[in-house]
Image (cartoon, grey):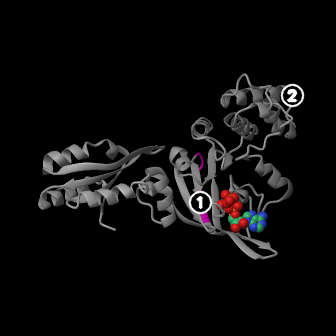
Amino acid sequence: MIQLKNVSKIYRTKNGEISAVNDVNLSINKGEIFGIIGYSGAGKSTLIRLLNGLEKPTDGTVEVNGQLISSITGNKLRVARQKISMIFQHFNLLWSRTVADNIAFPLEIAGIAKTERDKKVKELIDLVGLSGRENAYPSQLSGGQKQRVGIARALANNPEVLLCDEATSALDPETTDSILELLLDINKRLGLTIVLITHEMHVIKKICNRVAVMEAGRVVEQGEVLQVFQNPQADITKNFVHQITGSKESQGSIEQILINYPTGRIVKLTFVGQKTEQPVISKLIKQFNVEVNIVHGNISQTTSGPYGTLLIQIDGDAQNVQNALAFLETNEIQTEVIEHA
Ligand SMILES: Nc1ncnc2c1ncn2[C@@H]1O[C@H](COP(=O)(O)OP(=O)(O)OP(=O)(O)O)[C@@H](O)[C@H]1O
């Protein structure tokens, strides 16, 4: 559905050249939810603007929905862009128009007749859960409701692709989750391809199938969300994964345990999918006659299944501890023995 080939974008400013996007290659499938994560300045916004033709690449090609967005201009680009919608961090609603009139706006521009427009607006209001608020003005809505209007408006022209630019960054955690669930629901019901940019791993974890990690204009890592969680390669990806697992916060507890319990081994177990449901710890204690202290534990749900980490201390006879570690390895649970720093 979306192909980026060797895409670079250089901004030429008074103070010199800024390489915002550097040799990016991405392939996004029809119907998937693809996340692009990076810190501020990584080049995410530039990348998303390249996807809807608001920016042209300095090098490379951008293809969306069968159209070479990076080359087409004028009316051809305008028509192509009707199938590529966008929602924004600050909603970008028209403050003097009601909810219904905001949603009707793109339909008016597309020249849709009033009766058909009203029917479509009603459908969209139902879809995003805003029935009863048709005549409210944006200033009378909560942040989550405003984003629901943004989503309904973005869906008015039956797009093939929805681009989400930090769409939940201005919302509290609960509202964020309700908007993410709405996006997931829309993706399933309409088969819409969704590309979102964010600096929060929670957003990626909650709804994305695949993720690309951006740093200084480059994609430094990409893959299935669960795989990236289980085995992050780049340092920046490890930092993002820590946002979810909280394992950074547990560093103090590890140090403390290493001091308090100088014997045995501290082990970090990473479970993915079905493996999170196995009674591994009880097997460990029963079969190997070792003591197990739980230092820190965490399980997260992703669209592809659960993902969890557990930090434990295994103590006992040296051979038994060794056998227990070997057992964990054969269980296909990722095992990392944590040594003294
Ligand atoms: N129109 C522009 N002209 C000049 N430089 C720009 C322009 N837009 C972005 N940049 C620069 O390109 C780099 C990437 O910016 P971009 O906004 O794409 O990153 P980002 O990851 O979206 O960060 P943020 O979340 O802060 O917007 C930054 O150094 C930024 O200053």
* Camera-nearest residue between 73 and 244: 244
Q: Residue at x 51, y 64 (%)?
A: 236
Q: Marks 2/1: CA distance?
A: 42 Å
Q: Which residue is mark 1?
A: 38
The 10 Å Cα crowd at callout 1, few under 14, some 14 to 19, many 20 or more, is many
User: Where is residue 185 drawn, in percent x and y?
Assistant: 58, 35
Task: Check residue 276 in the rendering and tell me which mark sits there, or answer none.
Answer: none
User: Where is residue 145 drawn, in percent x and y?
Assistant: 69, 33
Which region is colored magenta?
25-31
Q: Which residue is mark 2?
A: 114
Nearer mark to the viewer, of 2 and 1: 1
Helix, strand, or loop for circle 2?
Answer: helix
Helix, strand, or loop for circle 1?
Answer: loop
* Camera-nearest residue between 92 and 290: 290
Choose top left, top right, bottom left or bottom right for residue 119: top right
Does 42 appear in magenta?
no
Instruction: Determine whether, in the image, residue 217 is placed left or right of residue 125.
Output: left
Cβ of mark 1 under 8 A from ligand 1: yes
Instruction: Determine whether, in the image, residue 218 is placed left or right of residue 298.
Output: right
Q: Is residue 297 visible?
A: yes
Q: Amino acid at mark 1?
A: Gly
User: Where is residue 316 drawn, in percent x and y?
Assistant: 15, 55
Q: Residue at x 79, y 29 (%)?
A: 100
Q: Amino acid at mark 2?
A: Lys
User: Where is residue 70 drawn, in percent x and y?
Assistant: 74, 62
Q: Residue at x 34, y 44 (%)?
A: 276
Vertical arrangement, residue 60 with respect to residue 104, above or below: below
